Image (tube, rainbow, N blue to C red):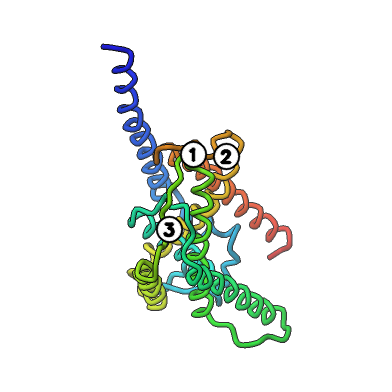
Amino acid sequence: MSQQQIRVTETRHKPTWIIIVLGLFYAGLALLLILLPGGTVLDRLRWLNSGICAQILTHSFYAGDERLPLCARNTGIYLGLMVTLISTYARGKGQAQKLPPLPIIIICTCGFLALAVDGLNSLALDLHMTHLYQPDNLLRLGTGLLTGTGLVLLALPILNQLFWHEYNEQHIVASWREFAPLALALLFCFLIVLSQNTLILYPIALLSTAGVLTALSGVNLIFIIAFSKRSETLQHSYQLLAFFSIALICAIAEMLLLAQLKFSLLQALGM
C-alpha cells in the first residue's frame, strides 16, 4: 500500500474514532446525571443552575407541583437559544457566516431591549422603587425567548467566522419565510411552558439547562480556540465538536463552582 493510500485510510478512520469517543463522552455525562446517588435528576439540574440563576419562587413556572430549574426569564432565554440552535443546524445553516437581513436584526435588537426594560422594571419593584408596570412571568418568558433567539442569530455567524477555515456565504436566516417556522417554534415553546403540564417538566428542564451549558461553553470555546491558535483553521464538524467537548467540561466545572460559592455565601449570611 502506498504512502498516499495509507494517509487516505487514516483520514477516513480518524473521524469515526473521534465520533465514537465523543459519543461515549456525552453518553457518560447523561448516565452521571441519571445515576448519581442522592436526589432526583431535577434536584441536580436545580443545583447545577443555582449559581447563575436566582431561582426566585415567584419568578418561576411550575409543571405540576415541581418548579422548573430556571426562573421564567432564564427559562425563556436558554430555551429560545437551544430551539434556535437546533433549528439552525437542522436547516443546514450551522456554519453560516452572514447575519440575517436588517429587519430581522431589528426584531432581535428589540427583543434585547424589551428584556432589559422588563428586567430593570422587575428589579425596581423588588427594591421597592418606582416601577412602570406590574411584572409578570409571561413577559419574563416572552422577552427571554426573543433574547435567546437573537443571541444565536446575531452571535453564531460571527463565531463561525472565527472558527472555520472556509467562508460560508449563507445567511443564518435569509428571509421572513425562513424566520416564520422559527417564530412558530418559539410560540409553541411559550404555550407549552405556560401550560405548566407535568409532561413538559423534564423536556423543558433539560433543554433550558442544555442552553445554559451551551452558552457558557460557547464563551469558553472562544478562549480555547484563541489560545490554541486554531482561529479560522477548522475544516470538519468533528474538530469543532472535540473543542466544544473540552469547553463543555469547563462549563460544567464553572457552574458547579458557582453553585457551591452561592451556597457557601448564603450559609455565611445565615440565609
Marks 3 and 2 sit apart, C-alpha to C-alpha, by: 26 Å
On the image, which quarter does residue 4 sit in? top left
Residue 164 point in image, percent of width and height: 47, 42
- Type of residue at label 2? Ile
Q: CA distance from mark 3 to mark 1?
A: 24 Å
6 in relation to 104, above or below:
above
Residue labelled with disc 2: 224
Position of residue 172 in the picture relative to residue 73 (left or right): left
Q: Is residue 256 visible?
A: no
Q: Is residue 61 above or below residue 20?
A: below
> What amino acid type should be assigned to the residue bearing mark 3?
His
- Mark 3: secondary structure: loop
Q: Name the residue beneath numbered marker 3.
A: 171
The structure residue drawn at horizontal position 56% and vertical position 70%, both measured from the top left corner, is 109
Point out residue 228 in the picture as x, y percentages from the top left corner.
Answer: 58, 33
The answer to whether mark 2 and mark 1 are in CB contact below 8 A is yes
Estimate how packed mark 3 is, as few (under 14), some (14 to 19) or many (20 or more) residues with alpha carbons within 10 Å. Answer: some
Q: Are marks 3 and 2 in contact (CB under 8 Å)?
A: no
Quadrant placement of the C terminus: bottom right
Residue that numbered label 1 is attached to: 243
Q: Would you say residue 34 is visible in this rendering?
A: yes
User: Camera-side residue: 215 or 253?
Assistant: 215
Disc sitting over residue 98 in the figure:
none
Local crowd size for mark 1, using a 10 Å CA cut-off: few (<14), some (14–19), many (≥20):
some
For the residue marked with disc 1, what is the amino acid?
Answer: Phe
Give the foreground label among 3 and 1. Answer: 3
Give the x, y percent position of residue 198.
Answer: 35, 71
For marks 2 and 1, give the CA distance. Answer: 7 Å
Nearer the observer, disc 3 or disc 2?
3
Q: Name the quarter where the N terminus is drawn.
A: top left
Mark 1 residue element: helix
Residue 192: quadrant of the picture: bottom left
